[in-house]
Amino acid sequence: MAEGRGSAMAITLLLCLFFIHCEMAQAKYYFVGGSKGWTFNVTNWTKGKTFRAGDVLVFNYPAMAHNVVALKNRVAYNWCLKTRDAKVYQTGKDRIRLVEGYNYFICSYPGHCRAGMKIAIKARKKLL
């Protein structure tokens, strides 16, 4: 009997690992701004791309020159306002996983967002 339980546990563990691997394999990595990285005039970079929840955005930029601020609403995005509930990234090599629905990102350095250093992404439901 103990052998049967051990085999069942091993199979369950293998299935769990398989599903975790499948979920990770489905996620796509997007380098924001392409070869230029996170910089000015990237607003249109999202055009023609299909994003899904779980996909990862990679923001590459000089850490002392910019940052990435994840906003929770369109009003703050449209007005380039860093809100208290916003999450700020500033490593220069940030990786941010998209959530289902709208995801808004700006650079909060003075004048940068208004110069087009912002993107809005609608992430579709994750594929199963």
Image (tube, rainbow, N blue to C red):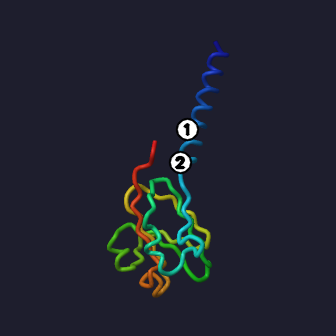
Q: Amino acid at mark 1?
A: Phe
> What residue is at 56 percent from the left and 58 percent from the top?
29
Taking 52 as reference, is 73 above or below it?
Answer: below
Front-most of 108 and 57? Answer: 57
Q: Secondary structure at mark 1?
A: helix
Specify the label residue 5 is tagged with: none
Identify the image quadrant of the N terminus.
Answer: top right
Which residue, given by chain and number where applicable, does mark 2 sit on? 26
- Circle 2: is it few (<14), some (14-19), or many (20+) Cα within 10 Å? some
Which residue, given by chain and number where applicable, does mark 1 sit on? 19
Q: Amino acid at mark 2?
A: Gln
Residue 84 appears in which quarter of the rendering?
A: bottom left
> What residue is at 38 percent from the left and 66 percent from the top?
72
Residue at the extreme front of the image, as rendered: 48
Q: Secondary structure at mark 2?
A: helix
- In the rendered image, residue 42, in percent from the top left (x then y), is placed at 48, 76
Taking 30 as reference, is 128 above or below it?
Answer: above
- In the rendered image, residue 123, in percent from the top left (x then y), is placed at 41, 57
> What residue is at 43 percent from the left and 67 percent from the top?
47
Residue 15 appears in which quarter of the rendering?
A: top right
Residue at the extreme right of the image, as rendered: 3
- In the rendered image, residue 18, in percent from the top left (x then y), is placed at 59, 36
N-term-proximal mark, 2 vs 1: 1
Taking 73 as reference, is 7 above or below it?
Answer: above
- Circle 1: is it few (<14), some (14-19), or many (20+) Cα within 10 Å? few
Front-most of 127 and 19? Answer: 127
- In the rendered image, residue 87, in percent from the top left (x then y), is placed at 48, 69
Front-most of 69 and 51? Answer: 51
